[in-house]
Image (cartoon, helix red, strand yellow):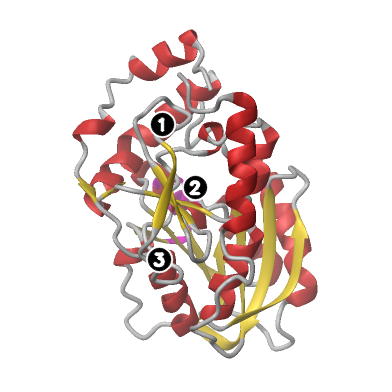
Amino acid sequence: MTLGTDRYERIHSLGYDYTRQTMVEVTSCNLCGGQRFITLVHRDRYGFPAKANACLQCGLVFLNPVMTPEAYKEFYASVYRPLVSAYHRRRIDADTIQEEQQVYAQNLAAFLAPSMPANKCSTLLDIGGSTGVVAHYLAKQFGLAATVLDPAPLEIECAQQLGLETIVGLIEDFRPDGRTFNVITLCQTIDHLLDVAATLDMIRRILSPSGIFFVDIVDFRAAYLRNWSIEEAVKIDHPYYLTEATIKAYLIRFGFDYLKKNYASDHLHIRYVCQLGVPRSDYVPSSGSTEMLREVRMVQNTTHDGVV
């Protein structure tokens, strides 16, 4: 994958030095606890020297090393939106994303409606809720009191203007203090999490017994097949890269039964509506990582992916 000169110059002009960020080494898989990894790529789509590993036991793909929570807080506060703007060559910020979020909210409400609990729901927690557009729409549609949690202060300010309860921060730092929620949404966010296992464990504990949990993933396999490039599917804002097999394993291990699953219209995301079930903490994808790694290698060998 060769990064376009213009794109590289736009990204370089931001002055963000990824190599100077504080990193931590991942020694055990967040999904299965395995400790044998293989490196898939050494550089991400922005041109940063970010390595992505795959667990040889379950197939989970993740950045390793990965930035610390403190480094990611700074990243989301000031770097993330300018970076994706430079990559796509258009302004992407708290103002410009709201129209797209409105469309997403309408589609999500229609997707959730048949699965909403028969008893009246009253509370919603939108994790990674950005400007609050999605939470605000769901709140109006289903009569919910909505709370938005997001690490980007400028986007949280937009949510505050909509009259929503807001919390600035990462979900990994959230302290529910005994609160529970009837509906919890993790919209286009799970790939951004620093600890998927800890987050799903918390969601299980704060979801009311009859509540529903929505999550959608960027399907890593769809992402690398779309551009026939592994590097183009990897980016420093996504510590994790989930597939149908690995998200299924996460949900089963942490006790979520999905009521409904479908492929989003962008052909990239997969959406799940879940309810509480019985955890199976020893579950591992049956095919492990073998099939995915074989396909990854085919893509790399066909395109010489990784040559910059």
Give me the C-alpha separation between circle 1 and circle 3. 21 Å
Q: Residue at x 70, y 83 (%)?
A: 117
Start-end of magenta stretch: 157-165
Q: Give the amino acid at mark 2.
A: Thr
Numbered disc 1: secondary structure: loop
Q: Give the amino acid at mark 1.
A: Arg
Q: Is disc 2 surrounded by few (<14), some (14 to 19) or many (20+) residues within 10 Å? A: many
**Residue 85 vertical position relative to residue 271 in the rendered view, above or below:** above
Q: Which residue is mark 2?
A: 131
Q: Which residue is mark 3?
A: 30
**Residue 1 vertical position relative to residue 288 in the rendered view, above or below:** above
Q: Can you tell which of label 1 and label 2 is closer to the viewer?
A: 1
Q: Is disc 1 surrounded by few (<14), some (14 to 19) or many (20+) residues within 10 Å? A: many
The numbered disc on residue 184 is none
* 273 relative position to 123: left or right: right
Mark 1 and mark 2 lie on one chain; the one further toward the N terminus is: 1
Q: Give the amino acid at mark 3.
A: Asn
Q: Which residue is mark 1?
A: 43
